[in-house]
Amino acid sequence: MTKLPTWADVVLVPVISLLLAAFFAAIVLLAIGQSPTQALTVMVNGALGSAYGWGYTLYYATSFVFTGLAVIIAFHGGLFNIGGEGQAMLGGLGVALVCLYLPMPHWSLTLLLAMGAAMIFGGAWAAVPAYLQAKRGSHIVITTIMFNYIAAALMIYILVNILRPDGSMDPASARFSDAVGLPKFHDIPILQDLFLKYDAEGALKLGKDGLPSYQRVPANVTFFIALAACVGVWRLLWHTKLGYEIRAFGKQEKAANYAGISSFKIIMVAMILSGAFSGLMAINNVMGQAERLLQNSAEGAGFIGIAVALMGRNHPLGVLLAAILFGFLYQGGASLGLETTIPIELRTVLQGLVILFTGALDIMVRMMLGWFFSPRHAQAKGAA
Amino acid sequence: MDYATLLQILDSTIRLGIPLLLACLAGLYSERAGIFDIGLEGKMLMAAMSSATVAALTGSVWIGLAAGIAGSMLFALVHGLASITFRGNQLISGVALNFVASGITVLIAQSIFAQGGRTAPLEGGARFLPIDLPFAEALQGVPILGPLYYEVISGHSILVYVGLLLVPLTWFVLYRTRYGLRLRAVGENPASVDTAGVSVRNLRYSAVMITGVLCGLAGAYMACGLQAGFGREMTAGRGYIALAALIFAKWRPWQALGATMLFGFFQALALRPDVVEAVVRVKVPVPALDALPYILTVVVLAGLVGKAIPPRAGGEPYVKER
């Protein structure tokens, strides 16, 4: 197989994989009698056509950055963590406990505590499968999947029997106090100007108090924490001893052992870090948006982390871009559910197709491109 | 717990264990040939939806069964393409196909039936009906064995007996036929099979397609036997539990029967809070019972398996020339 130029490897392969996924999704839509072009228009308008749409797209992207980083940390250690969903639910529990029982005078202090709790809870939930893999050889893929189901049952129990306020029927915790609410994009000076409301004539809409009013969006300050997390994970993996050990172990376990790297330590550390980042996503959805702990709080973001990691070529910068893309798919998919009769599950299909083409069929894509970049093909073009 | 309750639980054990058994045997063929298959779950789901849909539309469970097998085999084919022809990552391919199945089943069911992603309820000839084994009624009076035969062994649908018969059949195919020898060899050392002039690709494709057929049976049984129709995510992790059972059974057919019936027993217990409470004498919360099969799966994997050595070439794409 021809070796591809670096730019083709980094840019062209993911883009073509994405186009293939979109193509098959379009076929599915045609097969169930829907119009793919209409679907695409609704998705683009819903997710990118307004500041409001972007507010949601970036909110979802924030969650996906965290879960995507979680997956790549484990991937670099040669481990496949499918338990991001459960770890994110447990992270949500940590965040909720801090917000309910340890609120600080300022939101930033509460946020710091919540981040710690989210990482500890998420990391602990990943530590059990990691320990079983390291010590007992239990297949990490199966145990992490089982832990997703166990986490779901545990959350129902905790929400219904412990955190549910008296007299409430919902399986959800009490609402957090206003003091722990995180600033949203429409609360942040300068940035908020993007979310100003205008009336039909294009004049500013003023609230009852005579001040301008803003579109309320769920994107919040945790987006910037997600950006920082990308840099942090990049530093960790490529500029620290631990990161080197994780990557060496992931590439060749025996060679890493021979160089004095302990399998037990790396499996534990990589999985706990991975779980911690999955858990960390809860500061976005639980503290930043819902402001209480709901059942199924992670809403599949843990699984999307897998697609984001593969699409992002296992690199934090790629994860950021892929997370924004999936934020678009998620918000666009939600608009589909509202405005068309296409079920919201189209998102899951697209997610699966992206994982399929970027993760499992990428050699197919490379073969196709390899033919295009092969010397013989270039010669033939030169002769013509 | 009295004898009648025990019989009821054993009866549920078989009902709930059979989809696991079929899926586990499905995984056995694929993994013995060196192709990991995390995608049993998705194939079962796909088969459940296609069989229930076609059975509801035609009124015939047999056409439904054929459609279920076809749906499952389509997914198996894609998995084969990704992991054999294009030498991709088999775990990732399986996970991807599970997501596609999870979404596409709801999309199709919703577009046909418009009932929130469910298919129309099946009745009459659109379901697998219970079969009474010979003399079940007559022998009911025999102490202990009579009721056991009548309640537990007789009165299941045809796929239950097919599943049970597949255990010795799989054993025979695997250990007493040339195909089985080659299948096991291709999972351990594909280069040796290749040297002997047998196509690694064809063998592996055939194993993956058998996996598709068996997952098709599992899914069709779920939708048209165990329940009366398809509902979103109705397989609820059974594909993964079947994989755990496969590891527990160390990739051997008779042990697979034992392992899946054990997991079926856990699932049957989860349905009977009264019995569990009577035995442990503590009130057990419902979510704990829901989680029980998954927790016990982890416990079995962690504690009871001992050293489980997968087929040596499992998960490795075979490259003929370097």
Image: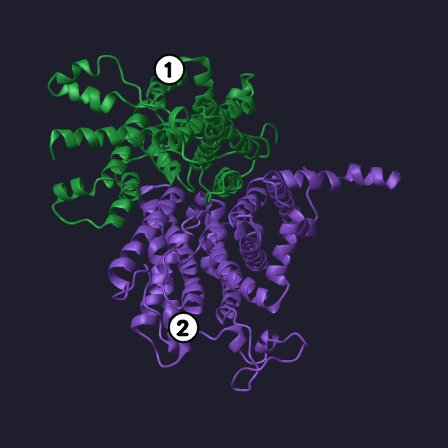
The residue at which mark 1 appears reads as B172
| Residue at 63%, 49% in the rendered image | A14
Q: Position of residue B76 (x, y in %)?
A: 51, 31
Residue count near mark 1 (Cα–Cα under 10 Å), binned few <14, some 14–19, many ≥20: few
Left or right: residue A376 versus residue A152 is right
Residue A190 % position (x, y): 59, 80
User: Hue of chain B?
Assistant: green
Badge 2 amino acid: Leu
Determine whether the residue tagged by mark 2 lies in a helix, strand or loop: helix
Label 1 sits on a secondary structure element that is helix
Q: Is residue A2 visible?
A: no
Q: Is residue A259 above or below residue B230?
A: below
Residue furthest to the right in view is A384
Q: Quadrant of the N terminus of chain B?
A: top left
The answer to whether dots 2 and 1 both sit on one chain is: no
For chain A, the rendered hue is: purple
